[in-house]
Image: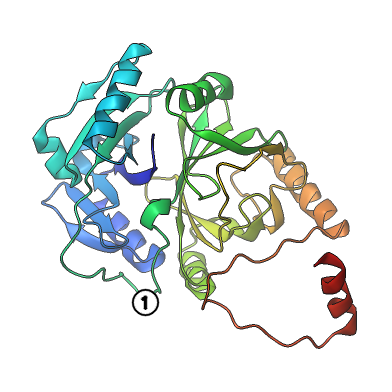
Amino acid sequence: MLTALGYAGFGSDRLDDWRQFGTNLVGFQAVERGNSLLAFRMDDRKQRVVIDRAMGDGARFFGWEVADGTALDALAAKLESMGVAVTAEPKTLADARRVAALISFHDPDGNRLEAFHGAEIDETPFSPGRSISGFRTGPLGLGHVVLTVENIEPVMKFYVDVLGFRLSDYIEKPFRAYFFHVNPRHHSLALIETGKSGMHHLMVELFSLDDVGQSYDVALSEERVNVTLGRHTNDLMTSFYARTPSSFMVECGWGGLEIEPAAWQPVELTDGPSLWGHERIWLPPAEREMAREMRMRAAASGLRAPVQVMEGNYKLMSGTCAWWDGVRKETS
């Protein structure tokens, strides 16, 4: 029923810091909306990310898209039939979110969720805050959000049984994390069990690997890197994580895996969570060392994965190594 992560909002009074972070590091386009609200564009939509001074630090909301008004009414009816309190939000809030209509409710950990339809399209082209090739959004949505939770099971039950998310895969070490999809993006939501409810990171996917590398240079120069450059084992994203002015992280990535939702089978991942890199500065020392050992084992075992590219986003080289040409024939 939900089709994509459409938008996200965060409370903060550090609007100037957020404007600098969003435009200069990530590449968002800043849109001023009065003295208390800063909106960011990523594509042709009027806004994708909102920073709201009036909400207070730590407050957050996530807008999940549905197809149309009929689908929104059906979702509201389903939620109410399952005992979830639903608010039909007024037009004033829909206008502020730049959508036709929305409802709001909360997950078991207290996160404010909004479901909406009819996102407004801006008449002017997207103009990034720095020179980038753009963000991979469209039907895949804004990107993905990762939440920390006290206990995964009740929150997972809500997202799967009530909202219709489907499990992509999961890990149990060096920490418990479960990944969920609503469209061909490998995951639009993930939950990490930390014993505490919170915001872990928001992922945005860029069109060019060079976009990510240049963002990484900015993050290094501003001492904002919380997870070093690396590549994930599950969604195969090459990325790094930067600390935002609100202390949670934004993951800037490239080359994410597209899946076929109808045929996808979830598995437990024991090699990872990264093929290489991704030194997790946020982890406690023991878990950080475990993650490092897992990466080294993956490297020692020869774990590899094809790079995920779009047509026109790569140049095919001729084979120059007889050994590699033999490997390709054996695996084709």
Q: In the displayed structure, would residue 252 be above or below residue 330?
A: above
How far from the left and from the top, in percent, is residue 188? 48, 44
In the image, residue 50 lies at what x, y percent? 26, 48
In percent of width and height, residue 326 lies at: 89, 76
Residue at 84 percent across and 52 percent down: it is 297
Residue 16 visible within the image: no
121 on left or right of 292:
left
Residue 91 found in image quarter? top left
Q: Report which quarter residue 127 is drawn in.
A: bottom left
Left-right relation of 315 to 184: right
Quadrant location of the C terminus? bottom right
**Nearer-the-camera pick, 146 or 157:** 157
Residue 257: image x %, image y %? Answer: 58, 56
Vertical comparison of 123 with 233: above or below? below
Q: Is residue 21 visible?
A: yes
| Circle 1: element type | loop
Q: Quadrant of the N terminus?
A: top left
Query: Is residue 275 positioned above or below 210 on the image?
Result: above
Q: Amino acid at mark 1?
A: Ser
| Residue at 36%, 60% in the rendered image | 21
Q: Closer to the camera, 193 or 88?
A: 88
Q: Which residue is mark 1?
A: 131
Left or right? Give the position of 323 relative to 98.
right
- 10 Å crowding of disc 1: few (<14), some (14-19), many (20+): few
| Residue at the spot 49% in from the left edge and 72% down from the top edge | 208
